[in-house]
């Protein structure tokens, strides 16, 4: 039997605006099992980014329940939730979010600082993660001295350093050219082949086509949920 990494039931999120209460999500139900590769799609304002923020525990729902590895995050105290998030989720963002004056090694090792890992073990693990994404030998480089595609690989290495069971990627190819985007998507496919659950938000159909499941949002609702063959490293 599959194990649910994410299960949301009646998930809703509303924001207070000048025009009144705006419901960005309206009673969403969704289960994502361990090892899935899912693309979250939809036009601007559809609710997909709000949904991703809730999945990443970066925001709290207004209504409904969110179970992360079968733990109801709404019922968890803040410090306990932070620990669960740090151990379970790796984040990859469109803008890379690298510290410009820190070496790639230090950027990748940053999540281990919050886990109180000492410097030498932290450096060793960071170098291992850089090698894993094809950047062996770049540990002492600064972000400004490498390409955008390489910077996104650094961001992926940082996301992997705590051995998460889940990667959340928000428009991970939005700042990359088409060739580099394909390389990054190939890397996500390889990570998924290794058993890591990958969930990515994208508005680009060719990027979503790499996933093996496509969930489309519109006006705060899920309007389609389709299994696909994908175009990742083990696509048919």
Image (cartoon, rainbow, N blue to C red):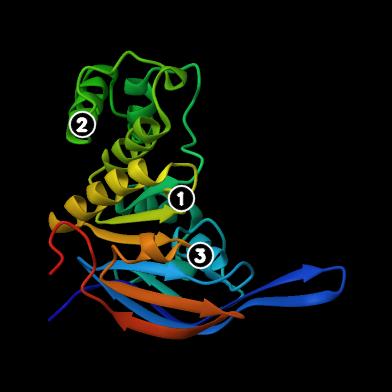
- The answer for how far apart the CA atoms under marks 3 and 2 are is 31 Å
Local crowd at mark 2 within 10 Å, few (<14), some, or many (≥20)?
A: some
Q: Mark 2 points at which residue?
A: 134
230 vs 166, nearest the viewer: 230
- The answer for how far apart the CA atoms under marks 2 and 1 are is 34 Å
Q: Position of residue 39 (x, y in %)?
A: 37, 67
Tell me, yes or no, if residue 114 can be seen here.
no
Label 2 sits on a secondary structure element that is: loop
Q: Which one is earlier in the sequence, the residue at label 2 or at label 1? A: 1
Q: Are marks 1 and 3 in contact (CB under 8 Å)?
A: no
Quarter of image, res 21: bottom right
Label 1 sits on a secondary structure element that is: helix
Residue drawn at x 18%, y 29% is: 131
Q: In the rendering, which numbered label is found on residue 197?
A: none
- Seen in the picture, residue 131 relative to 79 is either above or below; the reply is above
Residue drawn at x 32%, y 36% is: 153
Q: Mark 3 points at which residue?
A: 54
Quarter of image, res 123: top left
- Seen in the picture, residue 141 relative to 51 is either above or below; the reply is above
Screen quadrant of the C terminus: bottom left
- Seen in the picture, residue 107 relative to 132 is either above or below; the reply is above
**Between tags 1 and 3, which lies in front?**
3
Local crowd at mark 1 within 10 Å, few (<14), some, or many (≥20)?
A: few
Q: Mark 1 points at which residue?
A: 79
């Amino acid at each position: 039997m599959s194990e649910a990494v994410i299960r949301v039931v009646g998930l809703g999120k509303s924001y207070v605006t000048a025009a009144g209460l705006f419901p960005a999500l309206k009673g969403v139900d969704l289960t994502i099992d361990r090892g899935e590769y899912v693309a979250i799609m939809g036009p601007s304002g559809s609710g997909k980014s709000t949904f991703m923020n809730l999945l990443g525990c970066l925001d709290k729902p207004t209504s409904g329940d969110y179970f992360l590895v079968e733990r109801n995050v709404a019922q968890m105290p803040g410090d306990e939730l932070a620990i669960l998030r740090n151990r379970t989720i790796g984040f990859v963002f469109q803008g890379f979010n690298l510290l410009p004056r820190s070496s790639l090694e230090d950027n990748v090792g940053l999540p281990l600082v919050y886990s109180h890992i000492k410097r030498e073990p932290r450096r060793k693990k960071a170098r291992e993660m850089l090698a894993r994404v094809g950047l062996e030998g770049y540990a002492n480089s600064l972000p400004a001295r490498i390409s955008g595609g390489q910077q996104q690989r650094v961001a992926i290495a940082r996301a992997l350093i705590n051995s998460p069971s889940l990667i959340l990627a928000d428009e991970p190819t939005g700042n990359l050219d088409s060739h580099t985007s394909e390389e990054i998507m190939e890397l996500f496919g390889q990570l998924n082949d290794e058993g890591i659950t990958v969930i990515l938000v994208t508005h680009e159909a060719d990027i979503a086509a790499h996933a093996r499941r496509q969930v489309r949002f519109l006006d705060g609702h899920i309007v389609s949920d389709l299994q696909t063959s994908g175009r990742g490293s083990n696509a048919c």
